[in-house]
Image (cartoon, helix red, strand yellow):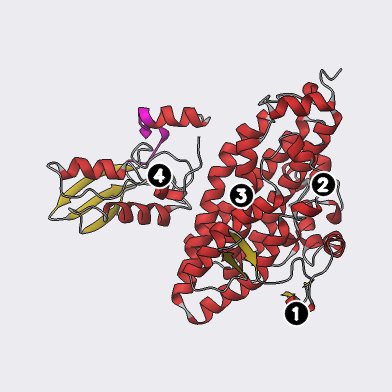
């Protein structure tokens, strides 16, 4: 028997109450937390094959070691997310191995191929920065105690990934020439990709489940601003063009292109010139998944049971 | 607890205005501000520093790492040099890598252990 009604629990968590067990959760709370944790764990999991396939372009053994350490962290972070989901009645086994590729809930950005070292490090600089914005907000505000404690380790490790991304973006842009052009090309498709990742603008948001249950503190638009506040100055410092600028009058960063807009995954190009599209069109594109979705999910799922079979001597 | 910038660059106090009476002691103090890139305790508290010498404005830091495949070696070296070279008595930093005796978690100082405990990290 749940000790609270939905309204009571919402009021309590806003006053600082920390939920520690599934027995204290209302159906609505459990559902919102399940969605949040699934997105979080799936995102960490799918970053691993994306980064793994790009890590082969590492320019030296030492740099490859750094890239692999990041991948290893991401898998551990995914495991933490799925482990927390088990506490609230989900099956880790089913979530990782029992779903079809299109059923995973990671952002569209991790359905895209990373085709060179520059794209890997811009992913660290942009996508991992987005992860830090989202997760440090959750860390500071979540009403779910076990998640707050787990995020201490995750957030610390993510700062290393970000550092890796920014240091390499600096090195490559400083080198100039083709190296800088590669970084610029990566920025061109990954900047809008990350902006879109934060989701629906606040004015269109239909329900505020995660905010209502205090599973996070900042809105989508606020998080987008937080991300731009670090990323736009970084790009300016490195002499890279980013399609956004600080608007003195509005007191916020504004985008220099129609948002949202269409993305051509085959050409890896945002159709700025075709104007604004609807969010229904965006959801349709997201639901259709991107070009690497099946390949990434398959690469995670195919090793299932291999180790056990080797231990049993089934494979020579 | 707050999440610091990798290497702790946001908590560096910056250079002293002039060379103090005991520059070697102040070198250790500055070094104690350099944080591990992942876990926010300092490289001194983590037990990575095997020795510091100061000779004619050149600081030699004898440094080890927690593992031979540590992914953060480059960052740690860079953070140490950048922090120490801010100080007026330091012209150059030389880092000597030391692998013997190898690092174990026995080398973490009491202060380091106390901080890790606060962060919820077991040693």
Residue A14 sits in quarter: top right
Query: Which disc is residue A273 wearing?
Result: 1
Judge whether A311 appears above or below A287 on screen: above
- 4 and 1 marks on the same chain: no
- The residue labelled by disc 3 is A133
Label 3, secondary structure: give it.
helix
- The residue labelled by disc 4 is B35
- 3 and 4 marks on the same chain: no
Magenta highlight on residue A120? no
Label 3 marks which chain's residue? Answer: A
Query: Which mark is in front, 4 or 1?
Result: 1
Judge whether A268 appears above or below B117 on screen: below
- The residue labelled by disc 2 is A97
Q: Residue furthest bottom?
A: A177
Q: Nearer the viewer, residue B53 or B14?
A: B14
The CA span between labels 4 and 1 is 46 Å
Label 4, secondary structure: give it.
loop
Q: Quadrant of the N terminus of chain A?
A: top right
Residue A70 in percent (x, y) is at 57, 53
The CA span between labels 3 and 4 is 21 Å
Residue A208 in percent (x, y) is at 79, 42
Q: Mark 2: give few (<14), some (14-19) or many (20+) Cα within 10 Å.
A: some
- 2 and 3 marks on the same chain: yes
Task: Residue at 14%, 41% (x, y): give it.
Answer: B22
The CA span between labels 4 and 2 is 39 Å
Magenta highlight on residue B107? yes
Task: Residue at 62%, 43% (x, y): give it.
Answer: A137
Query: Which mark is in front, 3 or 4?
Result: 3
């Amino acid at each position: 028997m749940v000790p609270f009604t939905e309204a009571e629990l919402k009021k309590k968590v806003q006053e600082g109450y920390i939920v520690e067990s599934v027995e204290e959760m209302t159906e609505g709370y459990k559902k919102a937390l399940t969605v949040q944790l699934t997105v979080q764990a799936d995102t960490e999991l799918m970053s691993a094959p994306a980064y793994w396939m790009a890590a082969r372009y590492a320019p030296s053994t030492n740099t490859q070691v750094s890239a692999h350490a990041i991948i290893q962290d991401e898998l551990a972070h995914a495991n933490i997310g799925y482990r927390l989901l088990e506490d609230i009645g989900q099956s880790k086994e089913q979530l990782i191995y029992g779903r079809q590729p299109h059923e995973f809930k990671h952002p569209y950005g991790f359905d895209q191929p990373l085709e060179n070292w520059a794209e890997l490090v811009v992913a660290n600089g942009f996508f991992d920065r987005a992860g830090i914005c989202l997760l440090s907000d959750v860390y500071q505000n979540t009403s779910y105690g076990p998640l707050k404690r787990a995020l201490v380790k995750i957030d610390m490790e993510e700062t290393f990934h970000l550092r890796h991304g920014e240091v390499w973006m600096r090195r490559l842009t400083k080198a100039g020439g083709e190296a800088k052009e590669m970084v610029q090309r990566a920025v061109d498709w990954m900047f809008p990709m990350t902006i879109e990742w934060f989701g629906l603008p606040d004015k269109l948001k239909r329900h505020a489940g995660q905010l209502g249950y205090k599973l996070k503190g900042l809105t989508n638009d606020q998080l987008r601003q937080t991300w731009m506040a670090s990323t736009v100055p970084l790009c300016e410092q490195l002499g890279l063009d980013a399609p956004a600028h600080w608007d003195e009058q509005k007191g916020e960063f504004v985008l220099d292109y129609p948002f949202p807009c269409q993305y051509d995954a085959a050409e890896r190009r945002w159709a700025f010139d075709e104007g604004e599209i609807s969010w229904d069109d965006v959801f349709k594109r997201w639901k259709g998944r991107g070009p690497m979705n099946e390949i990434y999910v398959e690469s995670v799922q195919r090793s299932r049971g291999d180790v056990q079979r080797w231990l049993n001597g089934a494979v020579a | 607890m707050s999440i610091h910038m990798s290497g702790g660059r946001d908590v560096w106090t910056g250079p002293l205005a002039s060379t103090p009476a005991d520059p070697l002691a102040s070198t250790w103090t500055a070094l104690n501000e350099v944080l591990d890139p992942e876990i926010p305790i300092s490289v001194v508290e983590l037990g990575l520093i095997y020795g510091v010498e100061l000779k004619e404005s050149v600081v030699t830091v004898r440094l080890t790492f927690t593992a031979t495949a540590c992914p953060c070696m480059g960052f740690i070296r860079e953070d140490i040099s950048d922090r120490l070279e801010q100080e007026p008595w330091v012209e150059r930093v030389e880092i000597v890598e030391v692998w013997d005796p190898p690092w174990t978690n026995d080398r973490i100082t009491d202060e380091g252990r106390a901080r890790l405990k606060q962060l919820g990290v077991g040693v």
